Image (spheres, rainbow, N blue to C red):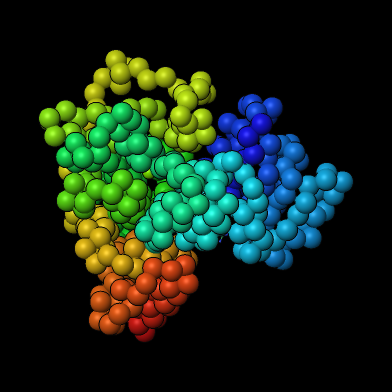
Amino acid sequence: MRKVTVLGATGSIGQNTIDLIARAPDDYDVVALTGGANIQQLADDARRLGANLAVTAHEEKLDDLSSALAGSGVEVAAGSRAIAEAAARPADWVMSAIVGSAGLAPGIEALKQGATLALANKETLVCAGSLVLETAKAHNARLLPVDSEHSAVFQALVGEDIDAVERVIITASGGAFRDWPLEDLANATVEQASSHPNWDMGQRITIDSASMFNKALEVIETKEYFSVSPTQIEVVVHPESIVHAMVGYRDGAVIAHLGAPDMRHAIGYALHWPQRRNLPVERLDLTKLGQLNFKSPDLTRYPALKLAWDVMDRGGLAGSVFNAAKERALDHFIARHISFTDMADAVAAVLDRFDASDGLIDAEMTLDNVQKTDHLARQWVDDTVVERAG
Ligand code: NAD
Ligand code: MG
């Protein structure tokens, strides 16, 4: 039996992971499940899967979780420290599916105990790429990509020499506003931004897909995970979301990865790696699809995408600044304090302010420094929003 833990078990990726685990309950010993405010879901899954431990991020919800799991034998805990402790419990495989930079510290704990970390939480590599990769190496732990594009690249690299890679092309659906007139974007509502044409995902990543902040994070994630240079990474808008990524080799060959837009592909690949097992996902029929379309992204529509290369040029802690500023700008958009197009402006302004503050971005990459810059970037977004409101 493999010991597994799911961080962010109540979310979109977490629930898809549990779906796969629950189909073969005899194969897995569930060490811990963690979640947020959805106590009922967390408790039901912990009971159903016979988890040893269930943890909610919210300390004030501990009593609710205890009552929901009374008599089940499942241990309960609450708070961010308890989540990190859950990640540190010995397990063979840990799914990192918390949303945002809150996923970083628990992911590092999982690597420190030598677990294989299935990385849906792209923020981990964006905020602290070298720290995370060094931690994995030092503890003989493995990182497997779960983001669909990165899983696709990983699969297109099997048996190949990374030095033979000329370019990595990741696709983007273009999100909710792909075909909107540009002048309407400033008035886009939270509800409009929260519906994705192809993928069923958590609200935050869905809005990030509409702005392409998600793709910007994925470009940085590609650089970190595969150690390719920023100039080798391309983004192509592909409205059907069937081709997830392509790897171009120096002989001109391009290997593409195709699949129905269902995250259980990438989750299942990481769960069963290096084997391939049967997965309950739709089989592609290209004759039914008829055609697949590709075009280059319009950077006036997606200014957030361009920022990815600015961030990679800056290096150091710029990824953490970028992600935290993006998270906070998104909070303000969801709270209706700023418009959809204000988000990219606010993030660019915070990056500039860091540039003007000597040494901050070039500080050593420790978890403490990453968390400090994260905190400061959020504060500076708040300053920008207050200025605008004033
Ligand atoms: P989601 O919002 O559906 O779920 C997030 C999970 O994290 C929930 O269990 C929630 O309770 C928990 N959580 C939220 N804030 C927390 C905090 N501060 N501390 C601890 N736990 C917290 O998100 P999702 O769509 O499942 O995405 C999860 C991660 O996977 C994100 O990093 C996202 O970018 C990435 N990802 C998601 C998809 C997808 O299809 N949904 C695809 C690729 C990558
Ligand atoms: Mg993705």
Q: From the viewer's perspective, is 63 left or right of 226?
A: right
Name the residue located 43 percent from the left edge and 51 percent from the top edge.
137
Residue 329 on image: x %, y %:
39, 67
Q: Nearer the viewer, residue 170 or 189?
A: 170
Image quarter of residue 372: bottom left
Residue 370 on image: x %, y %:
43, 69
Name the residue located 31 percent from the left edge and 67 percent from the top edge.
316
Image quadrant in which the N terminus is located: top right
Residue 287 on image: x %, y %:
29, 15
Name the residue located 30 percent from the left edge and 18 percent from the top edge.
286
**Does residue 63 sit above or below 212 in this rendering?**
below
**Does residue 285 sit above or below 185 in this rendering?**
above
Image quarter of residue 387: bottom left
Q: Nearer the viewer, residue 179 or 278?
A: 278
Q: From the viewer's perspective, is 113 left or right of 266?
A: right
Q: Is any part of residue 12 visible from this angle? A: no
- For this orientation, the residue located farthest to the right is 71
Q: Nearer the viewer, residue 137 or 82?
A: 137
**Does residue 130 sit above or below 198 in this rendering?**
below
- For this orientation, the residue located farthest to the top is 287
Image quadrant in which the C terminus is located: bottom left
Residue 27 on image: x %, y %:
65, 28
Name the residue located 16 percent from the left edge and 40 percent from the top edge.
166
Q: Quadrant of ligand 2?
A: top left
